[in-house]
Amino acid sequence: MATINDNYLKLQAGYLFPEIAKRVKAYAEANPDAPIIRLGIGDVTEPLPAACRAAMVKAVEDMGSRETFKGYGPEQGYEWLREKIAKHDFQSRGCEVDAAEIFISDGSKCDCGNILDIFGNNNTIALTDPVYPVYADTNVMAGHTGNANENGEYEGLVYLPISAANNFTAEIPQNKKVDLIYLCFPNNPTGATATKEYLQTWVDYAKANGSIIFFDAAYEAYITDPSLPHSIYEIPGARDCAIEFRSFSKNAGFTGTRCALTVVPKTLKGKAADGSDVEIWKLWNRRQSTKFNGVSYIVQRGAEAVYSEEGQAQIKELVAFTWQMLR
Ligand SMILES: Cc1ncc(COP(=O)(O)O)c(C=O)c1O
């Protein structure tokens, strides 16, 4: 008889979202006039920016002639897209990120989970509480935890509480060394943002302890305060200790279209079992080119259009619309 990955039986997420729905329903019935901000699973509501749609229509046409047709693309993503991302999202903000360090993918959710493929099974993993559930669940699936307790917390994970008491910013664990740290800013679910000074404390910690930060910047387009960093690589030293995840889902409405990116600096290293240093970029490149065949040409052309003049104006409108809905 074939056996299964028993770690899946530990998962609690099936319980979390129905429970949120049940409590929201009860509250809404008891308080029919109360405005409710839903922090459960959501989706974008607005259509794709016109610039992205036009680029995708043109790309569909490219697929119709032998001269411009594209088959398998580069697993890491087309260079014309990676160059634009490197320049616009990173270099323009003073970050030393090269196009070769960017990996295009079909989603930040996938990358946040898949990244565990290239890390060992004995790392101590820290994540905030509350947190985007994917970080915890993918560690459970990978067998990095024990069972959940009655609060849904998995044995073996280091939970860093975030609440009004600490201004929704997790404190560095004082009496436990952690190896992999998930940080998400602007934060899902709290919306909290992080200052450069705050992120610097994590980068300093990671560098001092040989830890790696998984920095999820899916919501960076929603930062309005010009003093706040959009990328972990705005923090000196981050190239040696951080991987960044970004997505076109939240700024350009690609939740159904699917396109995202992960930055793995070539200077980032992890330890092999024999104690030697190994380039994380090489492992991620190997993983992606073995298990992933790239995002479709049509979708990457759509994502590229985000960086056109019209695309930039249109995504600003989309983000402004979301802010309006929240007010
Ligand atoms: C914090 C965070 N990261 C990543 C994602 C997933 O993004 P994608 O649509 O690129 O998979 C989400 C989606 O809700 C999210 O909230």
Image (tube, grey):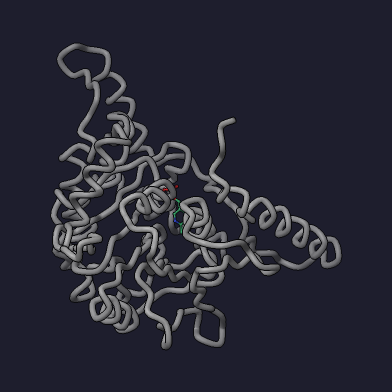
Identity of the residue drawn at 20% across and 60% down: 90
Q: Which quadrant would the N terminus be assigned to in this image?
A: top right
In front of the other: 230 or 131: 131
Q: Is residue 283 left or right of residue 56?
A: left
Q: Position of residue 227 (x, y in %)?
A: 30, 78
> Is residue 185 visible to the viewer in this orientation of the structure?
no
Q: Position of residue 200 (x, y in %)?
A: 28, 80
**Height in image: 52 above or below 267?**
above
Identity of the residue drawn at 22% across and 18% down: 69
Q: Position of residue 236 (x, y in %)?
A: 19, 76
Q: Position of residue 240 (x, y in %)?
A: 19, 68
Identity of the residue drawn at 23% across and 67% down: 233
Q: Which quadrant would the C terminus be assigned to in this image?
A: bottom right
Q: Based on the displayed image, in which of its 4 quarters is residue 214 positioned? A: bottom left
In front of the other: 110 or 320: 110
Residue farthest to the right, as pictured: 30
**Height in image: 62 above or below 101?**
above
Q: Is residue 240 left or right of residue 38?
A: left
Residue farthest to the front, as pictured: 1
Identity of the residue drawn at 28% across and 76% down: 206
